[in-house]
Image (cartoon, rainbow, N blue to C red):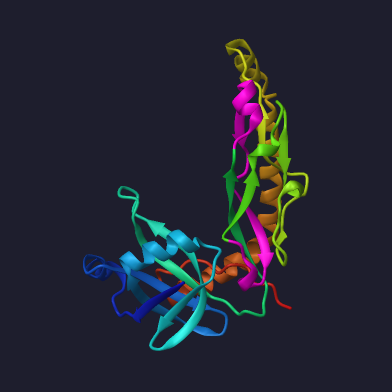
Amino acid sequence: MELNAEPRTQLGKSVKILRKQGFLPAVLYGEGIETKPISVPYSRFEKVYKEAGESSLVTLVMENAPYNVLIHDVAFDPLKGAPIHADFFAVRMDKEIRTMVSLAFKGESPAVKNEAGILVKVVQELEVEALPQNLPHELPVNLAGLAELKSRILVKDLAIPAGVKVLADPEEVIVLVEAQKSEDELKQELETGAAEVIAVKTEQETKRAARAEAKEGDEKAAESAERNSVAESRIYPTILQK
């Protein structure tokens, strides 16, 4: 996927003019390159972003120079839901990076179809580590394996592509099937806080928070440097040095 870009001088409130002309204001940055305010055609960006998401490589071409980039941290209009700004992170093809990849739930659970179970999606995305060219667009989750009530799919059950490492507990629950509960049962669970789904989510959120805290120092430093360079840019993904 290829996307053409142009340097821009409009900053701050003046970017509204760009948007009216059909361009999306953005920022290009990355290791070893100078931060550059840029703009990309809005209609083309929407198409590329739909196909690539934030975990597939895109070739950004500016002034006849190609950059291997990931679309990162897209800002949306809170009312219209349309993109209003995007970051493009230029990557090195010989260095592994970490990023979040969405889960794609496919198929149908027999326990939901035949036993009136309730499908509970506990996790919607996972953090992975891979070389840029190996990053998957999404990770498929086959719901056909949920054959009975109380069935669950764990991280270790996923089919992970070669060259990709999932940075999550292998025992972490991705999705499960709960039996339908009566009004009295639901009320009791709410009062006691003993619902299994709540417990699972709480445990996994605690683990993710611990991982995030471990990286907090590096992320804050990257964010501070980016803000000093260009006011509209946001945050660097974590780069793993070889």
Q: Is residue 85 left or right of residue 177?
A: left
* For residue 219, side relative to residue 18 (left or right): right
The answer to whether residue 231 is above or below residue 156 is below
The residue stretch that appears in magenta: 108-136
Q: Quadrant of residue 146?
A: top right
Asked if residue 19 is among those painted magenta in the image, a careful observer would answer no
Horizontal and vertical percent position of residue 177: 66, 30
Image coordinates for residue 142, horizontal then vertical, percent: 65, 44
Give whichever of 139, 67 is nearer the camera.
139
Q: Nearer the viewer, residue 143 or 40?
A: 143
Against 24, residue 120 (above or below) is above
Q: Is residue 47 above or below residue 174?
A: below
Residue 128 highlighted magenta (yes or no): yes
Figure check: 194 above or below 223: above
Residue at position x 37%, y 62% in the image: 46
Quarter of the picture holding the C terminus: bottom right
Q: Residue furthest bottom?
A: 64
Which x, y percent locates residue 120?
61, 33
Q: Residue at x 36, y 59 (%)?
A: 83
> x and y percent of residue 189 in the render?
65, 19
Between 160 and 98, the one lying in front of the other is 160
Q: Quadrant of residue 197?
A: top right
